[in-house]
Structures are given as structure tokens and as C-alpha cells.
Image (cartoon, rainbow, N blue to C red):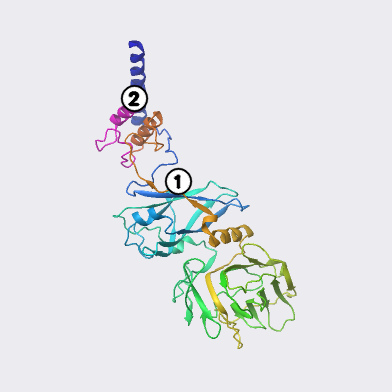
Amino acid sequence: MRRNKLSKGLFRLISLVVLLVLVVVGVSLEITRAAPYWWNTDWQYRMKLTFDNSASNENLVNFPVLVQLTSAHSGFWTHINSSITANDTRDLRFVDTGDLTELYFEVEKIDYTSQDAVVWVNVPQIDTGSTTDFIYVYYGNAAAAQSAYHSASDVWDSNYLMVQHMNNEYFNDSTVNNNDGTNDGTSYVVGQMGEARSFNGSGNSVAWSDTAFNFDYDDSFTFHYWQKTAVGGDFPIAKGNSSNGYRVGTEGDGDISVFMKVSGASGQIRRRVDAFTGDDIWHHVVITYNGSRDVSGLKVYVDGSEPTTQGSGNGVNAGDSMATTFVFYLGRNSGSTKYWYAGALDEVRISNTARSADWIETSYINQNSPSNYYTVGSEEELVIAPGDASGDGVINNDDVAYIGNAIADVMEYDPACDANEDGNINAMDITQTELLAQ
């Protein structure tokens, strides 16, 4: 028995000497924390958001995920700073678990009284078909200042020309392009997510300059929006009239039509799809065009998928151009006959690329019902166990190695590595952790 005790003691001594030698020579043990590692111990609470990307056949890169937190997430509203606003998010953080870095986010709405938050988070990559990719939302640090990662323009990739959340009368663009609109009478209405704008069908619109979004037949683009209307025969989006430019219309039967035409030419690129959208409920509409100068490059998606085409036109000649000096509008036609839109619009986006079918389908799933795209885990509270340096809930030799690595790399003070709780991280913590690991 005494020999066994001496052997164990000798083993611990040799282990300590080896670790100290590695520290002195500056060798990193490359030991990393287990997944539960707490990003920053100044934050007391977090929740895990796990994505269900099983419907996607591609890796979604820099994808803007809608995160909606409601009264169902009671712990969040209990522990986040009650002074939080859309412009001052203070202790709100989103963290990628892959390399433990903060993620850029934009707060569209956060209402402490009604317990409703609408936040857009740029996730660097969500793997194709994955159901295990996840991020964390951290909160509960009363002393926190505004995060540099609370930056709307960094949420939206460089292909976005404009992002309008339709949540106020100023129509401020969320991208770096400052494509702000001018309101003409639209009013507040409850949106698909957060707030939206209502158009009365007789004089309401939003205008941009005559140089805005001046696409031609060789350009690629995507229009993305949510609409809610009970009538048809109008134009939610237009930069043109019946002779020139482009328009997106809602037909009298609720079908969606897209017109791209050049003045004086008999041909046009046109597609009409069978999609009843005049039922006074929210529908997700996306139009993409790949610059092919052919109707095959023009696609329409409604509620995440492509409906049946009811009619199309294709006859653009070489050299034809649909670029115009018409003003770009939401809610009306650009020509003398206005065709005022009657209904509501939410989350209007314009890109200078043709977004993929997977990107569009995932956007619809996420925005239509966020809980169908991700699950929110139970609230976790920070509990620091001195000696559990790896953060896996068990004190063992992995923690001994991690503390040695922390000393070698002169890491920032971490209370989990301070096994003897003396305010320092040194060889004594290695000894203490070995004792705790027995």
C-alpha cells in the first residue's frame, strides 16, 4: 500500500515537473476547452441557438439569421439589462462557438415591456444539411458597454444594395450604401416580423432617386419582400412603366408578374406565376435574375418555392437596354398611371446577385417561423468551479494540462484556472488541480 502511494506521488511529481519544463520553454500543449466553455465570465447568462439547416443543400455563408426572443424566453427578459434599446444593446452579445468570437448583429426591435426582440445576426457559416451548428446569445452583465459588434452594416454582405426593415417612417437603409427612402404617407402596421408599413392604395408610396437600382439586362439582381394584400392590379415595386424599365406586379387574381422591357422593342423578359397572394395574409416573395438576357434567368419564388409559370415572354435583342431615368418606387408604378399598391410590405431587400434557391428557402423558413429554423436551449447560468479549466464539468488531467497551457501562453486571468483561488494562475494551481482530480 505504501509503495502504491509513493508511486502515485512520484507520478504527480513527474507530471508537475514536465508541465513546468514545458512552461519554461514556452511549449504550447494545444489543449482547448470543451464546448461548454464560457466565452466571457463577465456575462452571467446564455442560451444556445441550434440551427436546423437540413433543408439546405449548400453551405450558407455570412447568412443573416432572424433571432426572435419573446416572453417564452422568460429568463432572458429577467436577466438582461432593463434599459436596453434598439440603439443601446449594452449587455447583449452573440458568439460563434467555433472560435469563440463575437458575431455582428442588428437589433430591429427590442421591447422590454412587451418582451419582444427582433435581431438579425450574421452567422459566418451554417453547414449544408446540418442540424447541429449553433451559436450562443449572452446577456446579464450590468456593467457592459455598447458592443462594437452591434453594427447593422456588418450584418449584410457586400451584395446587398439595400435592406429596409420597414419599421419606421424614415426608411433608413441598414447596409453601408445609405439607400434611404422618402416616405409619402405610409403608416405603421404589425409586420411579419416586428413592424411593417401600410400602403392605402390611393396615394402612399416610398421613393428613391432616379439613379437608384438602375439594373439592365446584363445585371444580376434579387428583390426580396413580404407582402400582405387583399386586392390585386397594382405594383409593390417599380422602376418603369408599361413601355420601359422593370416592375413587379400583383395581378387581380393574386398572381405575381415581373416585367422587364425596353422602350421601342417588341420583346420583353416577363414571367407570371400561379401564386394566390391576394388572401390578406403575409407571403414571402423573391424575384431573381442572373443577367442572361433570357427568360430562363428570371425566377419567382413565393413562400420559399417556385410556383407554376402561367405565362412568359422572351425576345430581348442584342444591344437592348432597360436602364431608365424613372424614380424607383415601393407602392406604385413609375409612369403617369400610378397603379397604387393597397396592402402592407415588410423586410424589403435588394441585392446585386441572384440569390440561390437554398438561400431563399432558408430565408423563408427562418422568417416565416423562427422556431422552425432554430431551437433555443434552456437558460444557462455561469458557475465557476475552480480547477475545472476545460469547462466540461469534471476536474481531471485535461484540466491539469489546460492550466499548464494557460501559464505557458500567458493567458488572461481565468477564475476556472485559479484552482487554489489566490488570484493568480501558476504552478500551485496545477498541484491543486491534481489533488482535486483524485
Quarter occupied by residue 105: bottom left
Residue at image x 60%, y 49%? 129
Q: Nearer the viewer, residue 122 or 283?
A: 283
**Alpha carbon separation for disc pair 2 and 1:** 29 Å
Check disc 1 and report the residue beneath it: 99
On the image, the x and y values in percent for residue 77 come to 37, 57
Element assignment for label 1 = loop
Element assignment for label 2 = helix
In magenta, the rendered stretch is: 411-438
Check disc 2 and report the residue beneath it: 16
Query: Taking 356 as reference, is 78 left or right?
Result: left
Membership of 15 in magenta stretch: no
Q: Which amino acid does label 2 sit on?
A: Leu
Mark 1 neighbour class, 10 Å CA radius: few under 14, some 14 to 19, many 20 or more = few
Q: Do the residues labelled 2 and 1 touch (CB within 8 Å)?
A: no
Membership of 415 in magenta stretch: yes
Q: Is residue 142 visible?
A: yes
On the image, the x and y values in percent for residue 242 come to 66, 83
Quarter occupied by residue 216: bottom right
Quadrant occupied by the C terminus: top left
Q: What residue type is labelled 1?
A: Asp
Quarter occupied by residue 416: top left
Q: Which of 292 and 318 is in front in this view?
A: 292
On the image, the x and y values in percent for residue 185 come to 48, 82
Sequence order check: which comes first, mark 2 or mark 1? 2
Residue furthest bottom as drawn? 336
Quadrant occupied by the N terminus: top left
Seen in the picture, residue 100 relative to 270 is either above or below; the reply is: above
Label ID, residue 125: none
Looking at the magenta stretch, what is its main secondary structure? loop
Residue at image x 61%, y 85%? 335
Residue at image x 56%, y 83%? 201
